[in-house]
Amino acid sequence: MKPATILVIDDEQSILNIVTAYLRAEGYTVHTASDGPGGLRAARTLKPDLLILDIMLPGMDGIELLTQLRRESDVYVMMLTAKSEETDKVVGLSVGADDYLTKPFSARELVARVKAALRRYNPSSGPGESNVLAFRRLRIDVGARRVWKDDQPVELTTIEFDLLHALAEHQGRVLSREQLLERVWGHDFYGEDRVVDVHLGHVRKKIEPDSANPEFIITVRGVGYRFEGEAE
């Protein structure tokens, strides 16, 4: 099997060196970039299986880089932030990051997260048989990983699709944030359950007629989320 390709974008050479060493020791193919414009070019050229991206970069910060990249790619992105403030994490997630680590971090923890992410999103597993969940105004083709609202295709990232699928598959049942984290990110996810709220906010904007008054993804305060849809 071809080793996964990982692109690390950070302007601190010491971080590039240690992350590259640890990832290559696990057998991954690793490329690096040290500024925003170069990182964006590398992401477009290499089309990596996973991207590790620092927020603070010269030339173009990580937020702008990811905003541009998300228009053309759903690559799994782990964002690095030098600050622990909630704002930095939320901003990164809001523009499409799938996970984040706060500096300083353990290289072993980073490698563990990378390995877990690549296991979950390994395309070699194949699409499987078609299984369509059909609701009024919404169709979810599980095998093809495609979604339609009012017969119009909806573009979802990998994380967004998996969250929607998990909820729709358990229509009418409340799933806690912890259950969704385990289902979508895996039991070895180290981050906070806030990632669920942010990504489901993205899903709502894409599938709900009015995301402020959702019809499909209902918040159950203090518990989690429930999918409501009239089955066809």
Image (cartoon, rainbow, N blue to C red):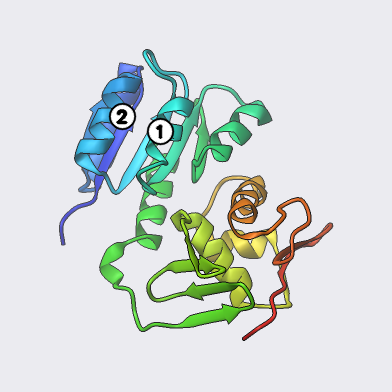
Q: Mark 1 — residue?
A: 68
Q: Residue at x 59, y 77 (%)?
A: 169
Badge 2: how crowded within 10 Å, few (<14), some, or many (20+)? many
> Against 36, is 138 above or below?
below
Q: Residue at x 72, y 55 (%)?
A: 210
Secondary structure of the residue carrying tag 1 is: helix
Quadrant of the image containing the C terminus: bottom right
Q: Mark 2 — residue?
A: 40
In front: label 2 or label 1: 1
Decide which of tag 2 and tag 1 comes sooner along the chain.
Answer: 2
Secondary structure of the residue carrying tag 2 is: helix
Q: Residue at x 38, y 37 (%)?
A: 69
Q: Amino acid at mark 1?
A: Gln
As drawn, the residue found furthest toward the top would be: 58
**Whole-number angstrom distance, CA of label 2 to CA of label 1:** 8 Å
Q: Amino acid at mark 2?
A: Leu
> Against 3, is 95 above or below?
above
Residue 117 can be seen in this image:
yes
Q: Is residue 33 left or right of residue 136?
A: left
As drawn, the residue found furthest toward the front would be: 151
The foreground one among 211 and 73 is 211
Q: Position of residue 197 (x, y in %)?
A: 67, 50
Residue 17 can be seen in this image:
no
Q: Position of residue 73 (x, y in %)?
A: 35, 46
Contact, mark 2 vs mark 1 (Cβ under 8 Å): yes
